[in-house]
Image (tube, grey):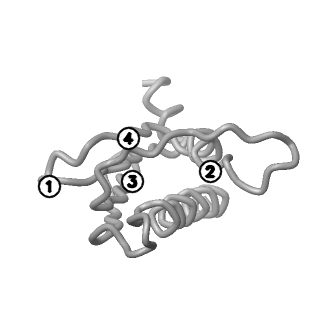
């Protein structure tokens, strides 16, 4: 369970860092608000990171020497059930949703 917490902590930190770096106007002022909601479900966790920027995040090319451009790849590698969509709950913005089931729960369902 500690590894799961570490992985999800890294994922949330990466997503919130992306909001702080990329959800800004050309002059550097923030595009509205950002929020992170974590909800426990019977099968795991749902994490939603929202920002008011209408531009959807996209993977950036990164070579071996690049200092950035790997964030969404890391998120996709560590999190299950990733969705990046325009926010259905707000008139503007983006929701990044992780519907994460711990591996042991998936194995228990498969065996049943």
Name the residue located 39 percent from the left edge and 75 percent from the top edge: 29
Residue at mark 4 to residue at mark 1: CA–CA distance: 14 Å
Q: Earlier in the sequence, mark 4 or mark 2?
A: 2
Mark 1 = which residue?
A: 90
Question: Compared with residue 14, is residue 88 higher up or lower down, i.e. above or below?
Answer: above
Mark 4 = which residue?
A: 84
Q: Quadrant of residue 50?
A: bottom left
Residue at mark 2 to residue at mark 1: CA–CA distance: 25 Å
State the image coordinates of residue 105 (x, y, percent, origin top left). Answer: 48, 40
Q: Are marks 4 and 1 in contact (CB under 8 Å)?
A: no
Residue at mark 1 to residue at mark 3: CA–CA distance: 22 Å
Mark 2 = which residue?
A: 71
Q: Earlier in the sequence, mark 4 or mark 3?
A: 3
Q: Earlier in the sequence, mark 2 or mark 3?
A: 3
Question: Compared with residue 39, is residue 58 higher up or lower down, i.e. above or below?
Answer: above
Mark 3 = which residue?
A: 45
State the image coordinates of residue 28 (x, y, percent, origin top left). Answer: 45, 73
Name the residue located 55 percent from the left edge and 66 percent from the top edge: 13
Residue at mark 4 to residue at mark 2: CA–CA distance: 14 Å
Quarter of the image for the C terminus: give it: top left
Q: Secondary structure at mark 4?
A: strand
């Amino acid at each position: 369970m500690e590894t799961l917490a570490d992985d999800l902590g890294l994922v949330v930190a990466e997503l919130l860092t992306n909001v702080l770096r990329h959800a800004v106007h050309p002059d550097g002022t923030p595009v509205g608000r950002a929020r992170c909601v974590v909800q426990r479900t019977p099968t795991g966790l749902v994490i939603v990171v929202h920002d008011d920027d209408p531009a959807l995040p996209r993977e950036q090319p990164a070579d071996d020497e690049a200092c950035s451009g790997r964030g969404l790849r890391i998120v996709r590698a560590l999190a299950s059930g990733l969705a990046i969509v325009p926010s259905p709950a707000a008139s503007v913005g983006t929701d990044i949703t992780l519907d994460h089931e711990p591996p042991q729960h998936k194995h228990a369902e498969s065996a049943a």
